Image (cartoon, rainbow, N blue to C red):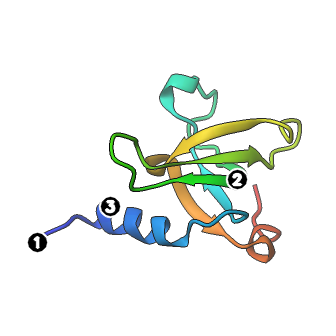
Amino acid sequence: MNTSYKEHDKEAIKKQLAKGCSIAYHLKPSQLPTNKEKLWHGRVLHKILDRVGLFDSVIVKSLEPGYEEETEIVFLEQIIDVFTDSQLSHVSE
């Protein structure tokens, strides 16, 4: 079976996702981001993966200043990277 690089990326990210890990992601176009390249960060509260009839996604609590109490659904396609807490502290904006 011939799979694309992007599909391999998605599978690698999917394997790293766990409750409590942190992710970096882009907002969906429908969220009308003012900066499409900005990476947002959130902590995974719940995974919704490999369920029939549902898109692979996670529910995250925002780690962004001013948005700390916000939760949102992030689809697998939006996720750029997965971090442990020690890795996230070294991420610069």
Q: Which of pointers 2 and 1 indicates the residue nearer the eye?
A: 2
User: Given the image, on which type of amino acid does mark 2 rest?
Assistant: Leu
Local secondary structure at mark 2: strand
Number of marks present in the image shown: 3
Q: Position of residue 7 (x, y in %)?
A: 30, 62
Q: Residues within 10 Å of mark 2 (few under 14, many from 20)?
A: some
Label 2–label 1 contact, CB within 8 A: no
User: Given the image, on which type of amino acid does mark 3 rest?
Assistant: Lys
Q: Position of residue 71 (x, y in %)?
A: 73, 38
Against 84, residue 39 (above or below) is above
At 57% from the left edge and 65% from the top edge, which residue is drawn?
17
Q: Which of pointers 2 and 3 indicates the residue nearer the eye?
A: 2
Determine which of the numbered discs, if any, sits on residue 1 in the image.
1
Q: CA distance from mark 2 to mark 3?
A: 25 Å
Q: CA distance from mark 3 to mark 1?
A: 14 Å
Q: Position of residue 41 (x, y in %)?
A: 71, 51
Q: Residue furthest left?
A: 1
Report whether 50 appears left or right of 75. left
Q: CA distance from mark 2 to mark 1?
A: 33 Å
- Of 35 and 52, nearer the camera is 52
Q: Which residue is mark 3?
A: 6
Q: Earlier in the sequence, mark 3 or mark 1?
A: 1
At 72% from the left edge and 51% from the top edge, which residue is drawn?
42
Q: Earlier in the sequence, mark 2 or mark 3?
A: 3
Q: Which residue is mark 2?
A: 45
At 48% from the left edge and 72% from the top edge, which residue is drawn?
15
User: Given the image, on which type of amino acid does mark 1 rest?
Assistant: Met
Report whether 48 appears left or right of 24. left
Residue 3: image quadrant is: bottom left
Report whether 43 appears left or right of 1. right
Q: Residues within 10 Å of mark 3 (few under 14, many from 20)?
A: few
